Structures are given as C-alpha cells and as structure tokens.
Image (spheres, rainbow, N blue to C red):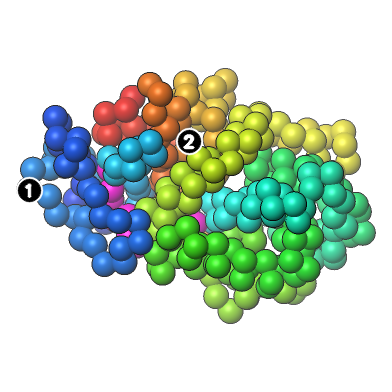
Amino acid sequence: MEDAAIAAPATAEPVIAAPGTEDKAITAPATENTTDDSKTEDPAIEGTAIEAKSAALLDAKSGKWLYLQNADEALAPASMSKMMTELVVLEQIRSGKLNWDDEAVASRYAANVVGSAMGLRSGQSVSVRELFAAMAIHSANDAAVALAEKVAGSETAFVKLMNDEAKAIGLSDRTRFANATGLSKEDLTAFSTADSATDTKMTAKDAALLASRLVGGFPELLKFTKKSETPAADGKTMLATSNEMLPGQQFGMKGNDGLKTGYTSAAGYCFTGSFLIGGHRYISVIMGATTPEARFEMTSKLLEVGRIA
C-alpha cells in the first residue's frame, strides 16, 4: 500500500552560528532537557530553513552545534534508531561478550519482520559480522532483530540495553527506543516480542550525539558504512547501500563515510550523515524530509548553511 505523502512541516526559525562568532555557537549540554534553541541575538542567515521536520549539524571534534532546527522535538527516526543497535552490538564485541565470528540463528520473527531485509530464513545460521554488515549497509531489519536476539535472548531484553545505553551516553529523556529496527508498532508482525505498545522516538540532537559517540568510539564501524554493497543471506545476491551520499552514489559527496538512513510513513525520510572534512568530523541529521531524494539534498544544503560545504 502506498504510504500517504507527508505534509510539509511548518518551518521554525533556524539557529546557526553567526559568521566570525563560531566560539559563540550553541553550547547547551547534551543532557539538557529544556532548551530554547530558536532564539539568538544575531542569526547569521534569516529566512533559510531546511525543508524537513527537524535538522541538526554538529562539529563532532569541537562539540559545537553549527545548525539547529526544531532539534529538541522527539520524532520517529525510523531506521536511524539502528545506530543504537549498532552501538550496543559493538559494545558487546569490545567487552568480549560477543565475537564477529559468532553464529546467530534466525528466529521466525527475524525471518518475517517487514521492510528492508537480507533474506534470512527461519533457522538459518549467520555470522554476527554478516548480520552487522547487512544492517549497517542495507538497513536490514531481519539482521537487526537476529543480532538483538543473539545479544540479549529477546528483542525486549535488547531494548532495555538500548535505553540503558542512551542514558549512559547522555541522550535526553525525550529519546526512547522501542525495538531494534525503528519500525513503527503498526509495522511489526505478530511475532514481535518488542514493546509493541509504543514507538521509538528520537530528537535530531540526540541522533547527532549518538552518531558522534558511535563513530568516535568505534571507528571500525566506518569499514562497513563506507561500502556500497554487502552479500544477502543467500551469499550470492548483493544488497546495495541505502546511503546515496557515499562517493560514487547519486548524491555522492567527498568526505562522506556513513551513516544511517531511515524511512517509515510516520517518520518520513531521514538521514544521519558522517563527514570528514578538513580534519573535522561533522555529523548531520535530517528528519522528516518528504522524499527519498530530499533527505540527501537537504543534507547538502545543511552543510552549506553550516558553512561546511
């Protein structure tokens, strides 16, 4: 069924750093839950807004916010929430509780979850490395569920790890994870053991902070996200990246090396990007764009407005 078009959101006044005043960029702490980033004494650009529900641009090296637009509103992030799934899995591997070569057996739920998939069959055994690659590159929902069940025994238990990690790294209490995939509760099959009574919500700020923690703490992730394709569960079919900003892709941009797309009818088209430009790591977030192309076009515009590109 065709998803209903998303109405263009009302655009809030953007907030960016004024030219020559980078040191006065927004400095509210990441854990602050009540901020008003819509106010600034000297907005650098008036009347310029990103055509999306929310947006954020972070200089991950300095920790400075370069652009914020409705960035504290909790919205559906769709598959961008898999960044937290990735973080929990990588933490498990670093701690020695999980290994890349460990095998995970796909449950009936994992094999039947809707959306992007690597084509797992119920009972199929696949390595953690293969599952992680399919999730990070192709945004495979079946791989995300299989990893969650491998790590914690059930998706429900894994979600607790996700929310515990969110608190540990200082994300706001507006952000809450309900499953390993980012799917809406309406999209989850009858096999789901996740918290099907609620939906995942995330702010653009928290998405940027999560991505910064992920890339900064686990640079090995980029070995996956830089790739343009990865094998499906059959070992023959190749699954394309969902990130069309990688060099060589339709909206390719020099310096992009990830990170995570997302789409549901509730979330619209989303993208968290990771860019290494001029020795600085920048994290961009677009939430609620109206078309698949717009999330990448608005990312380019976001970098321009933030004086990066």
Secondary element type, mark 1: loop
- x, y percent for residue 111: 82, 58
Among the 4 quarters of the image, the one containing residue 19 = top left
- x, y percent for residue 6: 43, 56
- x, y percent for residue 185: 60, 70
Number of other residues with Cα within 10 Å of mark 1, as a class: few under 14, some 14 to 19, many 20 or more: few
Q: Are marks 1 and 2 in contact (CB under 8 Å)?
A: no
Front position in the image: 222 or 49: 222
- x, y percent for residue 66: 27, 40
User: Residue drawn at (43%, 60%), measured in percent from left and top?
Assistant: 171
- On residue 41, the disc is 1
**Residue 80 seen from this side:** yes
Is 76 inside the magenta-drawn segment? yes
Magenta portion: prevailing SS class: loop
- Between the C-alphas of marks 1 and 2, the distance is 29 Å
For disc 2, the marked residue is 274
Vertical position of residue 21 compared to residue 169: above or below: above
What stretch of residues is rendered in magenta? 67-77
Q: Residue furthest bottom?
A: 197
Front position in the image: 230 or 36: 36
Among the 4 quarters of the image, the one containing residue 226 = top right
Give the left or right position of residue 15, taking residue 82 as reference.
Answer: left
User: Residue drawn at (85%, 63%), measured in percent from left and top?
Assistant: 107
User: Residue drawn at (58%, 60%), measured in percent from left and top?
Assistant: 182
Secondary element type, mark 2: strand
